[in-house]
């Protein structure tokens, strides 16, 4: 007996659902799981976890901070790049800081909890701190000596033109001393918390200063990556940390440099990306070769 067309169509659809459920819902996932169990791939399929004495210490694919309970860098370890993921390297809150090159003016409030730092000030503060930690020149263009963005709000008599009537160092709150005393003959004031000098008509004017064109502290040391989970730093950032790590561990700097070289990966396929140093793997190798005193 010939089935009605509507019933035949429903049965064909049901057969297609069953076939594709078996193929794509069962066989395909099982094939991928089986491939992930092959020797050489099983570790990656499990998240590239690293263990020490049977204890999982992290993943070679996800960065982590090497700081104490107060957030201060532990001197005997190489430091990772900054992270904007949650409180730092949080895989459940991976995200960028959403700040761009025009973020140069801080929000200053009488309540510290209401203050926010611009990207420029974050970069300046990090560069200054790294310079002090690693004994290198932490100066950067457009940064003040105290580690904030060197930015002025310049007020003119006719808005955008005319004589200068007032100048404010917008990222230095009173009673701080402005990084320059005068600007084109006009005394520079420190900012008063709660004021929006840009909304009041000030022209944002970054000041380059006398910092070297190529800062000693590399860019990846002072900026967070897009994911906030970067496990690598640049070889340049690793190099400026060698002397500190060697001193803290009582090791020969040449031996520490060799470890850095061993944990440096090149460009993918020889031309994509940049060389990188896996910080967690390097620090684990350091603990094995030069246990902390």
Image (spheres, helix red, strand yellow):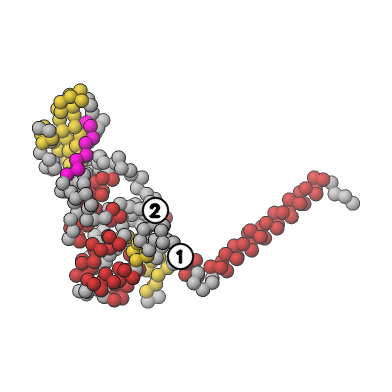
Query: Is disc 2 placed on a helix, strand or loop?
Result: loop
Work out which quarter of the rendered image holds the C terminus and state it. Answer: bottom left
At mark 1, the secondary structure is: loop
Q: Measured from the top left, where is residue 180 in percent x and y? A: 12, 40
- Labels in figure, total: 2
Pointer 1 with pointer 2, Cβ within 8 A: no
Q: Nearer the viewer, residue 129 or 93?
A: 129
Q: Position of residue 43 (x, y in %)?
A: 47, 70
Q: Is residue 165 above or below residue 55?
A: above
Say if residue 74 shows up in the picture.
no
Disc 2 packing (10 Å; few <14; some 14–19; many ≥20): some
Instruction: Residue under label 2, please give it.
Output: 227
Numbered label attached to residue 28:
none
**Where's residue 151, x and y in %?**
20, 39
Residue lying at the far top in this picture: please name it: 158
| Residue located 62% across and 62% down the image | 28
Q: Which residue is situated farthest in the right direction here?
A: 1
The earlier-in-sequence mark between 1 and 2 is: 1
Q: Is residue 53 above or below residue 87?
A: below
Magenta segment: 202-209
Real-space Cα separation, disc 1 to disc 2, in angstroms: 17 Å
Give the residue drawn at x 34%, y 68%: 263
Task: Assess disc 1: are there few (<14), some (14-19) or many (≥20) residues with their C-alpha within 10 Å of its C-alpha.
Answer: few
Residue where numbered disc 1 is placed: 47
* Residue 33 in view (yes/no): yes
Who's the residue at 38% across and 51% down the image? 226
Can you tell which quarter of the image residue 160 is in? top left
**Which of these two is toward me, 284 or 91?**
284
Residue 159 falls in image quadrant:
top left
Magenta run includes residue 271: no
In this view, the residue in front, 125 or 131, is 131
């Amino acid at each position: 007996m010939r089935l009605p067309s509507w019933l035949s169509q429903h049965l064909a659809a049901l057969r297609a659902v069953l076939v594709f459920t078996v193929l794509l819902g069962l066989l395909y996932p099982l094939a991928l799981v089986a491939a992930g169990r092959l020797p050489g791939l099983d570790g990656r399929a499990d998240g590239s976890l690293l263990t020490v004495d049977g204890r999982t210490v992290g993943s070679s694919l996800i960065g982590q901070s090497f700081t104490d309970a107060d957030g201060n860098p532990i001197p005997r370890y190489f430091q990772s790049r900054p992270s904007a993921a949650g409180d730092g390297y949080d895989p459940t809150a991976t995200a960028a800081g959403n700040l761009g090159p025009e973020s140069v003016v801080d929000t200053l409030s009488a309540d510290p909890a209401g203050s926010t730092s611009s990207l420029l000030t974050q970069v300046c503060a990090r560069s200054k701190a790294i310079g002090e930690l690693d004994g290198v020149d932490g100066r950067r263009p457009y940064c003040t000596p105290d580690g904030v963005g060197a930015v002025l709000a310049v007020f003119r008599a006719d808005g955008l033109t005319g004589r200068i009537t007032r100048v404010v160092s917008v990222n230095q709150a009173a009673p701080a001393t402005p990084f320059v005393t005068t600007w084109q003959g006009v005394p520079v004031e420190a900012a008063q918390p709660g004021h929006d000098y840009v909304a009041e008509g000030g022209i944002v004017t970054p000041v380059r200063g006398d910092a070297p064109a190529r800062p000693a502290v590399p860019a990846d040391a002072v900026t967070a990556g897009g994911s906030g989970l970067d496990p690598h730093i640049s070889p340049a950032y690793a190099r400026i940390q060698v002397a500190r790590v060697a001193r803290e561990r009582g090791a020969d700097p040449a031996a520490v440099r060799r470890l850095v070289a061993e944990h440096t990966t090149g460009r993918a396929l020889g031309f994509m990306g940049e060389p990188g140093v896996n910080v967690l793997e390097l620090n684990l190798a350091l603990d094995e070769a030069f246990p902390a005193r």
